[in-house]
Amino acid sequence: MQIQFENVSDFLTMSGHGIYVWIAVFFSLTMLIALILFPLYVHAKVSKEARIDQHKTTAPLGGEGSV
């Protein structure tokens, strides 16, 4: 296996193409993270709202302490 770059600086600059490569990597990772976290956020929000709605519908009509 042959190493393509002499040092870290050459790896980061990639013969002048580094800015495009690193922007693409950053954008891709950002989108992957968003695709993981956003559905989790929406699921938590919907679950919380469902629990609140269920609690409202199962609560006694007179409230606590009524006869």
Image (tube, helix red, strand yellow):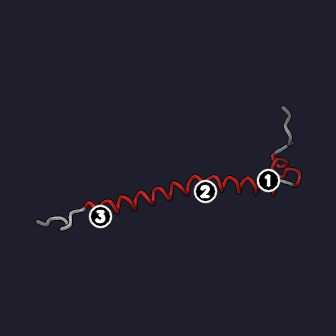
Q: Nearer the viewer, residue 23 or 59?
A: 59
Q: Residues within 10 Å of mark 1 (few under 14, many from 20)?
A: some
> Which disc is residue 34 wearing?
2
State which mark lies toward you, 1 or 2: 2
The reply, left or right, for residue 2 in relation to residue 61 is right
> Which disc is residue 21 wearing?
1
Q: Residues within 10 Å of mark 2 (few under 14, many from 20)?
A: few
Task: Look at the image and tell me in which quarter the C terminus lies.
Answer: bottom left
**What x and y, as percent, mark residue 33?**
61, 53
Q: Amino acid at mark 3?
A: Lys
Residue at the spot 65% in from the left edge and 56% down from the top edge: 31
**Quadrant of the rendered image containing residue 26:** bottom right
SS of the residue under disc 2:
helix
For marks 3 and 2, the one nearer the N-term is 2
- Reading the image, the residue beneath label 3 is 56
Q: Farthest top residue?
A: 1
